[in-house]
Image (spheres, rainbow, N blue to C red):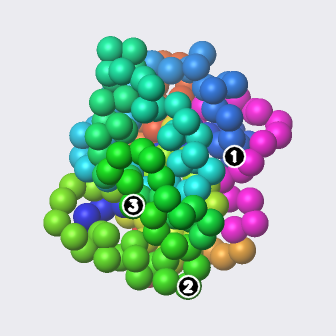
Amino acid sequence: MRKLRAVYFISLDGVVESPDKWHFPYFSDEMGEVIGSVMTDADAVLMGRSNFLDWQGYWPGVTPEQDPFAAFVNNVKKYVVSSTLDSVTWNNTEILRGGDGLADEITRIKEQPGKGIYIQGSPTLVRALLREGLVDELVLLQHPIVVGSGQRLFDDFGKQVPLKLAESKAFPTGVLALTYVPAEN
């Protein structure tokens, strides 16, 4: 079965919103290797509607020479969860309807042959998938900064989900790379 891996730049106070405003002073080659390994192990991206619309508005116009991530995201299979989108223009994209059948749709995708499924952003979607037990790895790149405001990854979570620390690395920039997997009950 394919692994679903969610990756976040996260502040000490749990903020994941707008990392472009606080993340870059902490970026390092080691962090790039973590993100690169997730992308290497994935052949699909899953995202919510807002994140998809942001990415669709930016990444199709970026070349791999401008940013190596463009080669990945512009060619990979993309699944967007939305109850309002009727069509998309970004190549290789499939719309998944949210709601009661979403867990079954994600399970169907995970059961298909292929490599892993990558999620970056879309915290509302990731919270729902964590509650359903569908996230196989949660990779948090915890930055040594208190942002003070913004959307937090676990706002309004409403349920305990036991996780186990599977791997941790500390980078010279002070960033911690923390990989969590579901805890065995």
The foreground one among 119 and 181 is 119
170 to the left or right of 51: left
Residue 102, compared with residue 77, is above or below; it is: below
Q: Tell me the kind of residue under disc 1.
A: Gly
Q: Going 35% across and 37% down the picture, which residue do you hit?
A: 74
Image marks 1 and 2: residues in contact by CB distance under 8 Å: no
Query: Circle 2 is placed at which residue position?
Result: 100
Give the class, few, some or many, for how many residues have Cα within 10 Å of label 1's Cα (few <14, many ≥20). many
Q: Tell me the kind of residue under disc 3.
A: Glu
Query: Circle 1 is placed at which residue position?
Result: 14
Where does the image place residue 8, in percent across and percent down from the top left? 53, 43
Give the SS element for disc 1: loop
Query: Circle 3 is placed at which residue position?
Result: 94
Q: Earlier in the sequence, mark 3 or mark 1?
A: 1
Tell which tag, 1 or 2, sits nearer the viewer: 2
Q: Of helix, strand and loop, which mostly describes the magenta segment?
A: loop
Tell which tag, 2 or 3, sits nearer the viewer: 3
Give the SS element for disc 2: loop
The span picked out in magenta is 142-157
Residue 154 picture quarter: bottom right
The answer, for residue 125, to whether it is visible in the render is no
Quarter occupied by the N terminus: bottom left
Q: Going 49% across and 77% down the picture, which residue do you hit?
A: 102
Tell which tag, 3 or 1, sits nearer the viewer: 3
Tell me how far mark 2 sits from mark 3, CA to CA: 18 Å
Image marks 2 and 3: residues in contact by CB distance under 8 Å: no
88 to the left or right of 142: left
